[in-house]
Amino acid sequence: MKVKVISILEDNYMYLVIEEQSKQAIAVDPAVPHRLLEIVKREGLTLTAVLTTHHHWDHARGNEALLKEVPGLKVFGGDDRIGGLTDKVTNSQELKFSSINVRCLFTPCHTSGHMCYFVWEDECTDAPAVFTGDTLFIGGCGRFLEGTAEQMYHNLTQVLGSLPQDTKVFCGHEYTIKNLKFAMLVEPENEKVKEMLSWARARDDDDKPTVPSTLMEEFEYNPFLRLSEEGVQKFTGKTDPIEVLRVLRKEKDKFKKPKERLPPHVLFLKLGQTKEEQEVNN
Ligand SMILES: [Zn+2]
């Protein structure tokens, strides 16, 4: 199983999961459809399905165009607001594409219909992968736009945190540096945060993505997965893990207050904005 990481829009990722033998491919959040189809063609792949993490335009906007271009394509997702949805999935539902298996993990909070996708291949020793959309980021987690701290706690600890530790994490945005700057504020003594931040900066200098990480690594530096750590509790002034998470997210919201989300046509006219001004999900 191969995962192709494709940087799109301001700081989004879309992905292609490729079964190398059959050359069948599944796309995750293919928000720039023609770019995706170019790659599919160039690599001699057959696109069989789309997995959509959530309905936000920067993840789901490509679905309808892909349906027009690829007859018989299936578009999976957990929210009726997802454009072009052909197959609505529910928690724990398993999908099979040749030797590639997908388990749908319902993770409501960033949006009320958010799904993550855990993917592995039959008879293959490669580590599994999880596509986390805007729920878990490298070094951070998504905003609680349509949900509660209780839900996100469940998502992070029970749903994602209980996956095999070597699972590779492919998230929806490249927010790693900004997330780790916040992690430094939360746990200034954490050497893993420092190491990861300097590594992420070097990747940025080379214009290379920081995905994937592994779950095991996330537990070492991502404050949103370290709610029982003394330093994180001290920063938030709370000990109950859900309260720690609630305060942590509030502090992250304030860390660099994102501006209101602008519709795409307005974004287009405002290309002079800084990257920070356009960031809304993290
Ligand atoms: Zn989003």
Image: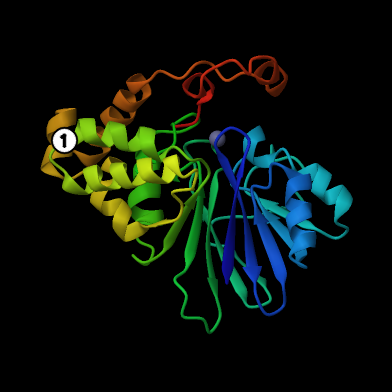
The quadrant in which residue 278 appears is top right
- The image shows residue 197 at horizontal and vertical percentages of 30, 42
Residue 188 horizontal side relative to residue 279, left or right: left
Left or right of residue 223: residue 141: right
Disc 1 marks a residue whose amino acid type is Pro
Whether residue 55 appears in this view of the structure is no
- Name the image quarter holding the N terminus: bottom right
In the picture, the quarter occupied by the C terminus is top left
Which residue matches tag 1?
188
Q: Which quadrant contains ligand 1?
A: top right
238 left or right of 87 in image: left
Q: Is residue 115 above or below residue 271?
A: below
Camera-nearest residue between 158 and 256? 256
- Return the x and y of residue 112 as percentages of the image width and height: 54, 37
Residue 176, given in percent of the width and then of the height, sits at: 40, 40
Q: Is residue 200 above or below residue 119?
A: above
The image position of residue 213, as x and y in percent, is: 39, 55
Count of picture labels: 1
For this orientation, the residue located farthest to the front is 206
- Residue sitting at 46 percent across and 33 percent down? 147
Q: Is residue 75 left or right of residue 229?
A: right
The residue sitting at the bottom extreme is 123
Mark 1: few, some, or many residues within 10 Å (few <14, many ≥20)? few
Q: Residue drawn at (30%, 60%), measured in percent from left and top?
A: 216
